[in-house]
Image (cartoon, rainbow, N blue to C red):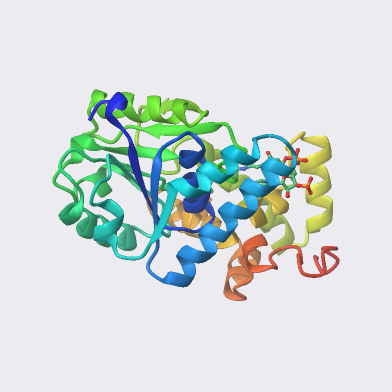
Amino acid sequence: MEFEDIETVAVLGAGNMGHGIAEVAALAGYDVFLRDIKEEFVQNGYDQIVWSLDKLAEKEQISEEDAEAAEERITPVVPVEEAVADADVVIEAVPEKMEIKKDVYNEVEEHAPDRALFATNTSSLSITELSEVTERPEQFCGMHFFNPPVRMQLVEVISGKHSSEETLSAVEELAEAFGKTPVRVHKDSPGFIVNRILVPLMNEACWMVSEEDATVAEIDSTTKFDMGLPMGAFELADLTGIDVIHHVLEYLHEVLGDAYEPAPFLAETVETENYGKKSGKGFYDYEDGDGADVP
Ligand code: 3HC
């Protein structure tokens, strides 16, 4: 599949990343199928896209016509065969668990056209291992967006062991057509580049709280105002999803060793199911809006 021939994009998973990627693709003029396993998940993802497009239009970052046209280009669906039947590219953004992703690829392989490229938005998992579930490993690569996709410029395009140059170039050109800046990651190592650096930073912040070396407020003030990050370490974890950070760390811990062991404070927070902004509460409380209950 050449970049020039790409017209239809299927995005699998309507969570934070999936709906953001679908929005970016629709804004760039592609026909988009947004798929999740339940009607309410797809609807929620679609509602978030509408919210975001309205916000961008309100701020005159896009015109109202562009917002409406983007909305119309997105078809929310549940049956996977409907989502991928006419896809030129399938971008998968389902939960960050190897087994879940492998199950999805088994299903998608059956229904997607032979020409379709498969791009996974995995945050850390092996592209090579995922690609080997399919019968088209050379048409498979990583396409890793950052949260929120509509605002973040970078896309990591990761080469698996079998990814062809044609596939990588087409996906890079697609990222550019989405208005993003692709960076080629030539080695499929755990966490790729950004998450190998960023996730341990958030974990170290959690270790400091676990060991009572510093509080959430102290660490966020330092990371934001002194280290110059756009958000504090905990604010960023809340935006990204504490469950996602935990999944990435579990994988890095498993394949890279003890330096990546999730901190108790992180693991305990995941157990409360307060995953961050998307849950209304994480390290900060977004329902009260003041973040007052952080240690
Ligand atoms: N669509 C439309 N508007 C949005 C939006 C979206 N998706 N998300 C936020 N906004 C709006 C907010 O509602 C707010 O609106 P308001 O002004 O009316 O209240 C406004 O955008 C805030 O934007 P600003 O430009 O004023 O704010 P900032 O300058 O702080 O920019 C930011 C926001 C771009 C999110 C910035 O804080 C930032 O870059 N943060 C870091 C994000 C980051 O590092 N992400 C990567 C995480 S790691 C990851 O995703 C990898 C994964 O695999 C784990």
Q: Is residue 195 found left or right of 289 in the rendered image?
A: left
What residue appears at the point 78 percent right and 50 percent down from the top-left corner? 219
What residue appears at the point 41 percent right and 52 percent down from the top-left corner? 93
Q: Is residue 136 found left or right of 76 in the rendered image?
A: left
Residue 188 visible to an observer of this rendering: yes
**Residue 162 x %, y %:** 21, 34
**Residue 9 x %, y %:** 35, 43
Position of the N terminus, as image quadrant, is: top left
Residue 214 visible to an observer of this rendering: no
Position of the C terminus, as image quadrant, is: bottom right
Query: Observer-nearest residue: 246 or 89?
Result: 89
Query: Where 119 falls versus 167 (above or below)?
Result: below
Q: In which image quadrant can residue 56 be found?
A: top right
Q: In which image quadrant can residue 96 be found?
A: bottom left
**Residue 15 x %, y %:** 50, 59
Query: Observer-nearest residue: 202 or 153?
Result: 153
Q: In which image quadrant can residue 63 be found?
A: top right
Give the total number of marks visible in the rendering: 0
Query: Where 261 falls versus 10 (above or below)?
Result: below
What residue appears at the point 68 percent right and 65 percent down from the top-left corner? 282
Q: Is residue 103 found left or right of 263 in the rendered image?
A: left
What residue appears at the point 71 percent right and 54 percent down from the top-left corner? 234
Which image quarter has ligand 1? top right
The extreme bottom residue here reads 272
Query: Observer-nearest residue: 73 or 267?
Result: 73
**Residue 26 x %, y %:** 47, 41
The extreme front residue here reads 65
